[in-house]
Image: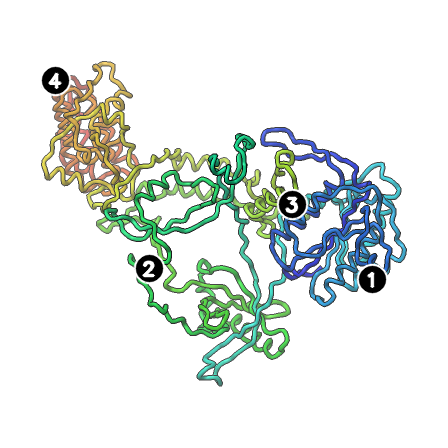
Amino acid sequence: MPAERAGYTVTMFLVDVSASMGKTREVAAPGTPGSEPQVIEMTNLEWSLQFVMLKIQEMIFNGRKTDKCGVILFGSEGTRNAINETNGGYDNVTEYIPIAQPNASTLAKLASLEPSTISGDPIDALIVAIETQDQYLHNKKTWTRKIVILTDGENPMEVEDWEATVNKMNALNVGLTVVGVDFDDDDFPFHEEDKSHIKKENEAFYHTFTTKLDFGVTGNCDYALQEISRPDIRQVKSTMMGTVLRLGDTMSREEEAIEIMVKTSKCTALARPKSWKRFGRRKRLTAAEQAARGTDAMDEDEERTTFAQLRMRTEFYLEQEGDEDEGAKQETRSADGDAEPESENKEEEDKQHIKVEKEDLVRGYKYGASFVPPPEDGYARLKTRKGIDICGFFARKNFRRELSMGEVYYVWADPSSPMQQVALSSIVQAMYEKGVMAIAKWVSKDDMDPKMGVLCPSVFQDVDCLLWVQMPFADDVRNFPFASLETLINKKGEVVKEHAYLPNNEQMDAMEEFVDAMDLSDAGEKDEDGNRQAWFDTRMSYNPAIHRTKQALFHGAIVQDLNTHPLPPPHPELLKYLDPPRRVLKRARDAIEDCKKTFNVRQVPKKVARVRKEEHVRAQDEDEEMLLLDQKPARAGPSQRKTQQTQVQRSPRTQKKAAVNVDDSETEEEPEEEELLLDSKAASRRPDVNRAPLPTPARSLSPDPIIDRQRMPGRIIGLSFPLEDFRKNISRGDVVTKAVEDLGFVIQQILTKPFSSRRYNEMLDCMRELRKVALEEDEIDAWNSFIQELRETCLDKKPGNKGFWDKVRGAGRPLSFISSVEATKAGGKSGISESEAQEFVQK
C-alpha cells in the first residue's frame, strides 16, 4: 500500500462474537518486579479484542479528526445493519459502533462485549462493512479504506461468489487484514495441533482470499499482538501548502526578478513523549463540607487514597517594602478545588508578598536588566508579504549544521505547471553544480513574522527540489568561548609545556587505544559474506521515552485492573541499543584498565551543598596560585567548631590580605562559631606513640576564620599564610612535631601548584624557619626526611619545580641536611655526615 495521507482513513473492525469465541485460554502476564510471571485465564474474545483496542487507542493517541473507525459484530444475537434494513438478509450482523472518530467510550463499549450463543458468517459481515464504508465515503475518493476481521475460524461460512467480493474491494482499493486466533504462522512460528476440519478449511480460504486482493494479509493473533507493541515510525504524506518562491525585487524591478509557484511539505516532524497530567492527593473534607456535599464521613473508607487532577493557574505578587528586590513576582501554581497545595510555606509566602491582579499590570519587554513598557497602541508590525524570498547565496561548505532549528521542509514546484517545474529545476541544478546554498526569508501569511532559513538543493532521480530549514537571527546566536584544552599560558605569557592538566604521550596512547577498542563499525552481526556490519543503525533506533510512554498509556486503556494485568516489559527492539555489545566490552576491558591506571582515576567525593551569602562575589585574585579552580577541602563540622578552636591576633594589614585571598566559590554564610586552627581529632588519626595526647585548645585562641580558608583536613598549617601559622603553633610548645610535619607538607603542596614562582622567597623563609625549629626542638630526622622528599618532588616527579630547587642550591649549606656536627652542638643526633650535607645541595 502506498504511503498514506496523515489521517483521512476509515477502518472497519469486524469482530467475531460467536459462541466459539467464549473458549477460555491461559495467557502469561508479567508479574510484579522480583516475582514470577502470572498466568491469567480469559476468553478468546477478551484476548483478541486487545488487538482492536490497541489499534483504536492509537487513533485516540494521534488525535486526528480525519482518522475514523467503525465496529461490526458477526455472530450476534440480533441483526442491525444497512443492507438488512433495505433488502433483508445478512442475519446476525450488527453495526455495533457507527463510523466516527474514536474516543474513550469506544474502548468502553468494546470491553463490555461478551460471546453470544450462536454463530455468524464473516463473509456477510465483510459485505456489510464494504457497503457501510462506501456509503460514508461515496464522495471522498482520496480517503484510505481498511477492514480488519477478528475471528477464530471455527464456524462455517458461505464462500460462493467470493471472487466478486474480491473484485469489488480491489476496485475500491480496500485493504483487508485477517487476524486469526491460533492460526498457523510460519514466521511466528506457530502450528496448532488437533485443529478442527472447519478451521483448517476456513484458514486456507482466508489465505487464498487475501492473496487475490491488492492489499491483503492473514496472520496469527498472538504474533499481531507482539508486532503492534513494536516501536515503529509511520511514514505518511504531509499536506502540501501553496506559496511563491521569489528571486530578486519583484516590486520595483519586475523584469530582473523571478517568481515561481511552489508547494511546501514536511520532510521531518519532531516527536515528543506524551505529556503527563499532574494529580494531587485530595484533602480530607471537614464535617461541614461533607454535609454540604451530602456525604457521610462514616461511609468513606479512610484507607482509600483519592487523587484529583491539578490545573495550572498564574498569580502575580508584589514584594513588600523592605525586601531586597522590589517588583512584581509571577508564580505558577497547581491548584484544584479539593487538592492540597504543593507548597507547605504558602501561608508564609502570602505574608511577604501582596497579590496583584492581572488587570493592574503592564506588559513590558526586557531590555538588559530593566523592562521597557510598549506604547499603548503597541509596536507597529513589520509589513511582510507571503512567500519565500531568496536574499543571497553562500558556499555550502560554510554552512554550520549546529545552527539549524526545527523541522525540515520540502519546496516543490507546482505539480500542475510544467513551466514552474522547469524553472525551479534550473535553479536547483545551478545551486547544486556551484556548491552553494541560499539564505531565504519565509513568510507563511501576509503581515506575519518572517522566519530566516537556508535553502539547500536536493537532486533526486526523477525530481529536483529544495530543502528549507530555519536558522537563528544573528542577535540570537550566543558565543561561549573557553580556554584551550591543549595550550596553557601563564600570566607571564609563557606557554606551559608540562603540567598536570596537559596529557603526556603515555596518556595519549592509552586513550587512543581505548577509543579504537570502542569502535562500533564492526560490532554488528555478520552479513552473507561473513563480514561484520555496523552495530548501530539510525533507521532501526527509537526514542525509548516516546514508545514506552505510548505503551504504558495503551496498556492502561485496554485492561481493567493493573494489579492483575501489570504493564509488560518494553519491546526488545526498544532496548536493542541501550546496552553496548558484549564483543566491544570484552575488547575494551584491557584498554579501560590501562586508562584507569595511567590517569590515576579515583572516585569523586560527593559534594556537600553550601548556603551562600546573597552579596557581591569578587573575581579571582591574581595572588591565588592556581591555573584552574582546585577543589577546596571540606570544612570542619559544627561539633568541631564548638570544641576545638584557637585564636590568632593579626594586624589590620594581615587581615586585609587574608580577606582578599578568599576564593569566590567559598563566599558562604559564616556560622556564629569561628573556624578551626587546630583539629586535634584529625591530627590524632596518625598518633605518635612517643608523645602525649594533644590538649584541647581553648576557645580564646581561635583564629580569624579567613586565615583558614585553604587549610586541608587534619592540617594545622594553611596554604595562605604557612609561616605565620607555623610560628603561632610553635609558640604553644605542645604541637611542635605536628607543626613541623604539616609545614613540610604545605611547602611541597604550594611548589607543585601553577605559578608557584611568585612564592619562592616566602617558601625559602619557611624552610629557614623550619630548619631552625627542627634543630632546636630535636626534630632533626623530620627535617632531613623533608629536604630529601622536596628534592625528589622538584626534580624527579611531574610536574616538578626545577626553578625552586635552583634557589635552594643558591642558598647553599644553610638549607641542606642537618649533619651530625650540628646536631651534637644542639644536643641531638643525626646520621648525616658534614661531607654528605655539603654534597647534597651541590650535586
Q: CA distance from mark 1 to mark 4?
A: 119 Å
Residue at image point 25% right, 25% down: 640
Q: Nearer the viewer, mark 4 or mark 2?
A: 2
Q: Secondary structure at mark 2?
A: strand
Choose the circle earlier in sequence order: 3 or 2: 3
Q: CA distance from mark 4 to mark 3?
A: 89 Å
Q: Which residue is mark 4?
A: 824
Give the percent coordinates (x, y) of residue 393: 45, 72
Q: CA distance from mark 2 to mark 1?
A: 68 Å
Mark 1 belongs to which amino acid?
Asn
Mark 4 belongs to which amino acid?
Thr
Q: Which residue is mark 1?
A: 167
Give the percent coordinates (x, y) of residue 816: 16, 29
- Determine which quarter of the picture holds residue 799: top left
Residue at image point 59% right, 29% down: 34
Disc ID at residue 366: 2
Choose the circle earlier in sequence order: 1 or 4: 1
Give the percent coordinates (x, y) of residue 643: 22, 23
Picture mark count: 4
Q: Which residue is mark 3?
A: 229
Q: Secondary structure at mark 3?
A: loop
Q: Nearer the viewer, mark 1 or mark 4?
A: 1
Residue at the limit of the structure toward the bottom, as seen here = 255
Q: Nearer the viewer, residue 536 or 60?
A: 60
Give the percent coordinates (x, y) of residue 229: 65, 45
Mark 3 belongs to which amino acid?
Ser
Q: CA distance from mark 4 to mark 2?
A: 78 Å
Mark 2 belongs to which amino acid?
Lys
Q: Residues within 10 Å of mark 1 (few under 14, many from 20)?
A: some
Q: Residues within 10 Å of mark 2 (few under 14, many from 20)?
A: few
Choose the circle earlier in sequence order: 2 or 1: 1
